Amino acid sequence: MYRVFLLTLVIASCLQAATQEETLQRIRDLEARLERAEALIRQLMEARTPSLETPAPASAPEVRKSETAIAPDRMPQELLPNLGLIGATSSFSAGTHSGPYSSARGNYFAGSVSLPLAKAPAGQLLYEFSAGLSQSSTNLNVTSNVAQVANLAVLGPGLLNDALRGTGAAPFPVQIQTKSDIDLLQVVPFALKYQTSMLNRWRLRPYVIAGLGLYVTISNQNSLTGLRPDANLPAELRAALNALFGNGAPFGGSLIGGQITAARELTALGIPSGQGGITPGFQTGGGIEWRMRPRFSWGLDLRWNKLSNGANFYTIAPRGSFHF
């Protein structure tokens, strides 16, 4: 009986030792699997985030030639491909114009903002809002019908010929030499601009543009003419007219419609004389930009403007642009 008890105790001890050894072996197997899993995760993370110095793997997707041909120091890195840093541009221009309404050439100033709309074949399509100011000054002879009426009031119907022609005894000149100043504000709230990226390797981007706009014209004719110095008038009548119109009014100064000056009260308040109007029109043109810096480019801009009243003119100006 004693021997049976000892034998049973020995067998139980052996079974317990075998169970512990099997448990330890399982733990070692699990640890080895965990180490292999961690190593695999590290390899995957390194493959997804390569360093800047690591060249692209041979199995990487093929990149278009138009993008690989651009060296990093030639064109800036773009968040939206082929659209600029984020695709937006703010531009300013200062140049000359051909002269609206057959006026002389003059100064031209403009500014614009371009925003990307969509990618297009070999380039991109943008929306542009622009505003410009064209200024010109021209010597112009005008016929004043108001002066004819004023001459008739002074001379009477007996001297009708002198009154209408502004000759002889007519106190006011009918043909008035003026300096005609024209300010034309062009606002183009909607224009589409196509810009190609085919010349990116030389940092050049040509573009064409077309849009609809409104043209605000303000014109003013300025004359220094007052009374006719050679008018054949009686001395008393000349003195009376000089007392009334010695300051050049109503035909000396800024003329309204090339006819007559504004009232003295309006002039004293500083209210400008002249006339103006708003006319719809169409604008088209193009140009080219050279990217000097990642955020700045310089170029040349040419626009042709056609107004609904038949007037047309073109503008040409150097163009500076900020990219953001």
Image (tube, rainbow, N blue to C red):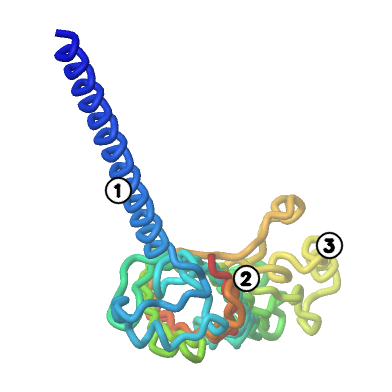
Q: Disc 2 marks which amino acid?
A: Asn
Q: Residues within 10 Å of mark 3 (few under 14, many from 20)?
A: few
Secondary structure type for disc 3: helix
Image quadrant assignment for residue 169: bottom right
Secondary structure type for disc 2: strand
Tell me the residue that label 2 is attached to.
Answer: 220
Question: Mark 1 and mark 3: span between their CA atoms?
Answer: 114 Å
Q: Is residue 254 left or right of residue 295?
A: right
Is residue 265 visible to the viewer in this orientation of the structure? yes
Please give the name of the residue rendered at 69% of the width and 70% of the height, measured from the top-left corner.
251
Across and down, in percent, residue 201 comes to: 47, 89
Please, is residue 271 above or below residue 287 in the view? above
Q: Disc 3 marks which amino acid?
A: Ala
Q: Disc 1 marks which amino acid?
A: Arg
- Cβ–Cβ under 8 Å for marks 1 and 2: no
Q: Is residue 87 left or right of residue 124?
A: right
Q: Is residue 295 left or right of residue 224?
A: left
Question: Mark 3 and mark 2: span between their CA atoms?
Answer: 26 Å
Tell me the residue that label 1 is attached to.
Answer: 33
Is residue 313 visible to the viewer in this orientation of the structure? no
Please, is residue 170 above or below residue 246 in the view? below
| Depth check, front residue: 98 or 121 | 121
Q: Nearer the viewer, mark 1 or mark 2?
A: 1
Q: Residues within 10 Å of mark 2 (few under 14, many from 20)?
A: many
| Depth check, front residue: 189 or 120 | 120
Tell me the residue that label 3 is attached to.
Answer: 243
Question: Mark 1 and mark 2: span between their CA atoms?
Answer: 91 Å
Picture quarter with the N terminus: top left
